[in-house]
Image (cartoon, rainbow, N blue to C red):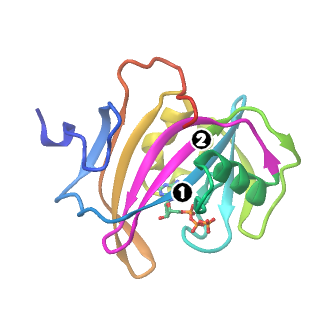
Amino acid sequence: MNSMDAKPPGIIDEVKMVHGGGSGDWFPAEEIRKYTNVFLIQGDRLLLGYKKRGLGIHKYNGFGGKVEPNESTLDAAQRELQEEAGIIAPLEHAGTLLFVVPGSKWAHIDIFRAEEYSGTIAESDEMRPEWFNKGEIPFDNMWDTDRYWLPLLLANRPFSGRADYEKKGEDFILKKWWFGINPNTVSQANQCI
Ligand SMILES: Nc1[nH]c(=O)nc2c1ncn2[C@H]1C[C@H](O)[C@@H](COP(=O)(O)OP(=O)(O)OP(=O)(O)O)O1
């Protein structure tokens, strides 16, 4: 077995590698902090937000943020979607991502998808929403590993993965990554946890 085939520390789901790369050792364990990220799909289009401030400024991303104490992950995802894009939506759990930077808490991100919504999509202080055709997703202007797992979300393949970055000044340099899917699931999304 190629050493990259083995699941990295922190991935507990039963998944088989579909993308992996980079070099060196996985960074050591730190405390975990929970985040959410929501992607809205309508037919051939995907809604992304252009981040106007904070971490990941000027990148496109889903809508999300920290899970507050005493809040469920699903409640946090719905709250952040409402705060950042002005809408509410029924959410399906799509995958998990561990975002690891030495010296910081691990970001455990529960990623959700939605195909319906209510309300009016609106720009917020943090995000400017913008629709993209599925064939024209701006991966060069997103976090580096989104190109590996976002197609799995669009295909409704539940996934888990990890991305280790090193921080150089304001830049995050991707060092090592690993993404897997459950080989037994065909096109069913996970239920919410
Ligand atoms: N699409 C994505 N791909 C990725 O690889 N890492 C992501 C990601 N979206 C977020 N992250 C990482 C970056 C960061 O460490 C953490 C949280 O990022 P967020 O943009 O959600 O955080 P914020 O600090 O804006 O949270 P709030 O202030 O609560 O909105 O998750």
Q: CA distance from mark 2 to mark 1?
A: 11 Å
The residue type indicated by label 1 comes to Tyr
Q: Residues within 10 Å of mark 2 (few under 14, many from 20)?
A: many
**What amino acid type should be assigned to the residue bearing mark 2?**
Phe
In the shown orientation, is residue 82 left or right of residue 181? right
Locate residue 98 relative to residue 28 in the image: left or right: right
Whether residue 179 sits left or right of residue 146 in the image: it is left
* Residue tagged 1: 35
Which residue is located at x 36 percent, y 74 percent?
167
Which quarter of the figure has residue 4?
top left
* Residue segment shown in magenta: 87-111
Residue at image x 54%, y 37%?
193
Q: Which mark is residue 112?
A: 2
Please give the name of the residue rendered at 76% of the width and 40% of the height, measured from the top-left corner: 89
User: Crowding near pointer 1: few (<14 within 10 Å), some, many (20+)?
Assistant: many
- Callout 2: helix, strand or loop? strand
Residue 186's label in the rendered image is none
* Image position, residue 73 (x, y; %): 58, 49
Residue 81 position, x and y percent, is 72, 52
